[in-house]
């Protein structure tokens, strides 16, 4: 949406039990507002209820959103794993699979990318000679629960 005069420069997350909301500022007074969620594989257009709840939550963050112009409404499925947590999974050879960013992708993608690059560099550098070496490296990482080997129980859905 286009909302002149609001002036947000950083992403905002509203932690409301009924209306979780992200506001992601872009250039030229543009804002991406999200995210409603419904478990399932429904690919139908945005419902009136979802739009009203989302826009009401944005208005509660800043009243100027009441005069904003809606430029686009989208609804899509998001990649997720059963526990709704992201994973970087190494196949033990040459492939890293990054999956499961779910509805938090915009906020956590930079950290997941950083972890995936560090993971790839370590793998290419021969740091994982055996399972114990991999486990030690993972346990010392900034986000150890993100990193997995193909033999771990948690795999991409």
Image (cartoon, grey):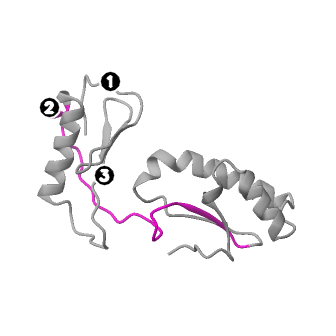
Point out the frontmost of discs 3 and 1. Answer: 3
Compared across the picture, whether 7 is left or right of 130 comes to: left
Kindly state the secondary structure of the residue where label 3 is placed: loop
Is residue 52 positioned above or below 40 on the image? above
Which residue corresponds to the image point at 75% horizontal and 69% vertical from the top-left? 94
Prevailing secondary structure of the magenta residues: loop
What residue sits right under mark 3 in the picture? 35
Q: Are marks 2 and 3 in contact (CB under 8 Å)?
A: no
What residue sits right under mark 2 in the picture? 67
Label 1 environment density (alpha carbons within 10 Å; few <14, some 14–19, many ≥20): few
Magenta region, residue range: 65-91
- Checking the image for residue 56, the label placed there is none
Kindly state the secondary structure of the residue where label 2 is placed: helix
Point out the frontmost of discs 2 and 3. Answer: 3
Which residue corresponds to the image point at 24% horizontal and 33% vertical from the top-left? 61
Label 2 environment density (alpha carbons within 10 Å; few <14, some 14–19, many ≥20): few
What residue sits right under mark 1 in the picture? 7
**Nearest to the observer: residue 132 or residue 121:** 132
Compared across the picture, whether 26 is left or right of 123 comes to: left
Task: Give how far across and how far down residue 40 sits, in percent.
Answer: 30, 72
Earlier sequence position, callout 2 versus callout 3: 3
Earlier sequence position, callout 3 versus callout 1: 1
CA separation in Å, label 1 and label 2: 14 Å
Q: Is residue 83 magenta?
A: yes
Task: Give how far across and how far down residue 152 sits, in percent.
Answer: 65, 74
Is residue 128 positioned above or below 10 on the image? below
CA separation in Å, label 3 and label 1: 21 Å
Kindly state the secondary structure of the residue where label 1 is placed: loop
CA separation in Å, label 2 and label 3: 20 Å
Label 3 environment density (alpha carbons within 10 Å; few <14, some 14–19, many ≥20): some
């Amino acid at each position: 949406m286009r909302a002149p005069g609001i002036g947000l420069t950083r992403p905002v997350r509203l932690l409301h039990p009924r209306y979780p909301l992200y506001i992601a500022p872009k250039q030229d007074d543009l804002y991406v507002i999200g995210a409603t969620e419904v478990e399932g594989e429904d690919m139908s257009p945005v419902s009136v209820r979802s739009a009203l709840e989302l826009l009401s939550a944005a208005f509660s963050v800043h009243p100027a959103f009441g005069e904003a112009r809606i430029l686009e409404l989208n609804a899509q499925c998001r990649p997720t794993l059963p526990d709704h947590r992201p994973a970087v999974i190494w196949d033990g050879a040459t492939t890293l699979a990054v999956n499961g960013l779910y509805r938090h992708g915009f906020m956590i993608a930079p950290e997941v990318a950083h972890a995936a690059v560090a993971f790839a560099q370590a793998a290419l550098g021969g740091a994982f000679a055996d399972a114990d070496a991999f486990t030690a490296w993972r346990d010392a990482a900034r986000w150890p629960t993100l990193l997995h080997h193909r033999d771990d129980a948690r795999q991409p859905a």
